[in-house]
Amino acid sequence: MNPNRRRAAVLALSIVAMLATLSQNAGAQSAPRLDYTIGITDAVKHLFHIKIEASNTGGRTLDISMPAWTPGWYTIRPYASNVIKLQAHVSGKRLQMKLIDKQTWRIETEGNKTLTIEYDYFADNLNVNGADLTDKHGYFLGTSLFFYVPGHTTDSPARLKFELPAGWRVATGLKKSSEPNTYLARNFENLADCPTVMGDFDEFVTTALGKPIHIVVDPKGQVAPEAGEKLKEYVSRVIEAEGKIFGGLPYDEYWVLYVTGKLRGGGALEHENSTNVMMPSMPSDPRFVIGVTAHEHFHAWNVKRIKPAGLIPYDYSKEQYTRELWFAEGFTSYYGDLSARRAGLMPVDDYLRGIASAIRRLQNTEARKWISLSDSSFITWLNYGGQGGGFTNFTVDYYGKGELVGLLLDLEIRGATSNRKSLDDVMRHLFDNYYKRARGYTNEDVEKVASEIAGRSFTEFFAKYVSGTNELDYDSALKHAGLRLVDGKIADLDAVTDAQRALRRSWLGE
Ligand SMILES: [Zn+2]
């Protein structure tokens, strides 16, 4: 490149940068901004105190909403019913407000551009998608606790400040600010995506592919030093196995929050740079938490970054329908176990036994003949969390069947390409060409990408197994790895070729 052209290029770049700054500022000026302070009214009565400084409000009214659900946990929740003594004021003068739907209040701003909103929040729900406060600890996920301004969940940054009792600390994936006990969020989506533990907990720090991994256990004292070392090692190994699929980790730091106690509901939930795992107590052998940790961590790509188009942006106000949960959850389950296997934390026999039992579960589910993966994803709002007829009667488990479709697709791609390509390439392609280009995907996109990578059409495969209810052809896929299904167990073919053995080793990371 000659010097003149270089100058022109530099000038063009600085104009682009200037325009980008101008448009960012324009966005920041037009969007109302909420900054939050979380304190405690009465820990014994489970009452948080939340104070919100609203600025740049504009207009005569400001609407504020509590979310009606938590991304990843597809159930409507009455979070707004925990809001107590809600008021908005300017310099101590109360502003009029009224409810306009089950979770939204309209504040008469009287033309004020800045105002204060305050409320207590009843937090007695130790649950992945809830909030809990006692005199021992605090826990919350922002969806259950914080108001947002409808229409402005992605365009306005926020600050979150903690007013903590003596001796308490904070663990959260939010970015630390230079001020003490203060964190920064890109926007409401980011704020609501970071589960947070407050109190005096154990923290183990390790690294994976050069990135810090924080492992928090609350309450403290549950993990003996030797088990703590093992926990660090296992978590790090499984994260590295997953990171290798994508050529690195997609965040600066990652937080694994293991929270135990008297739960309202167990489980675990995925986030961009963290996961909250809830159990009655920590198991003595850290190996037992690796499966769930591997699953949730894989979601850092699959569903938190590689996102179904229908979930962009999140609509916190109501059910958000998507036909892709079989991929978002099922393929995450597939890779969770496969990564534990590849990290050497699960013997091959155990891994194959796991697949065999997933097959048994599906084949014992009558509903597989009646409802497709696509429909069971779509209708998750009717039964997520176990209400209704349950997975076995009303619908098919898109985790379990999705995992098996992931297995079949992986082995069919490997078979079609003499093991030169695999499902790993599909995942990497979706990350590079959908997430990195700010696009969501649909079932049709997955079919297209898989077909391109395999060099063969998967139209019939998707018609039968994703939008249809045909029986899965396990043996057709397993034979590529020299395996077959015999009496509900996975066994070697009578004669296994060298190519089949090589494919199996590469697939399972032996
Ligand atoms: Zn999941």
Image (cartoon, rainbow, N blue to C red):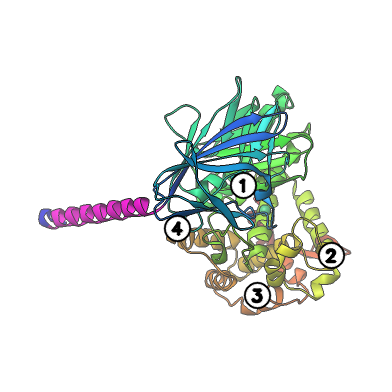
Is residue 119 rendered to the left or right of residue 367?
A: left
Q: Can residue 509 be seen in this view?
A: yes
Q: Distance between the residues labelled 4 and 1?
A: 19 Å
Q: Residues within 10 Å of mark 1 (few under 14, many from 20)?
A: many
Is residue 105 rendered to the left or right of residue 331?
A: left
Residue mark closest to the camera, 2 vs 4: 2
Residue closest to the eye, 204 or 455: 204
Which residues fall within the magenta stretch?
A: 5-31
Is residue 361 rendered to the left or right of residue 440?
A: right
Q: Is residue 234 visible?
A: no
Circle 1 residue: 297
Give the answer, above or below, for where 229 lies relative to 16. Answer: above
Label 2 SS: loop
Circle 4 residue: 436
Q: Which comes sooner in the sequence, label 3 or label 2? A: 2
Residue mark closest to the camera, 4 vs 3: 4
Q: How crowded is mark 2: few (under 14 residues within 10 Å), some or many (20 or more)?
A: few
Counting every numbered tag in the picture gives 4
Q: Hey, which residue is sitting farthest right in the picture?
A: 487
Residue mark closest to the camera, 3 vs 2: 2
Label 4 SS: helix
Q: What residue type is labelled 4?
A: Lys
Q: Residue 462 carries which label?
A: 3
Counting from the top left corner in percent of width and height, residue 180 is at 47, 26
Q: Residue 389 carries which label?
A: 2
Q: Which comes sooner in the sequence, label 2 or label 4? A: 2
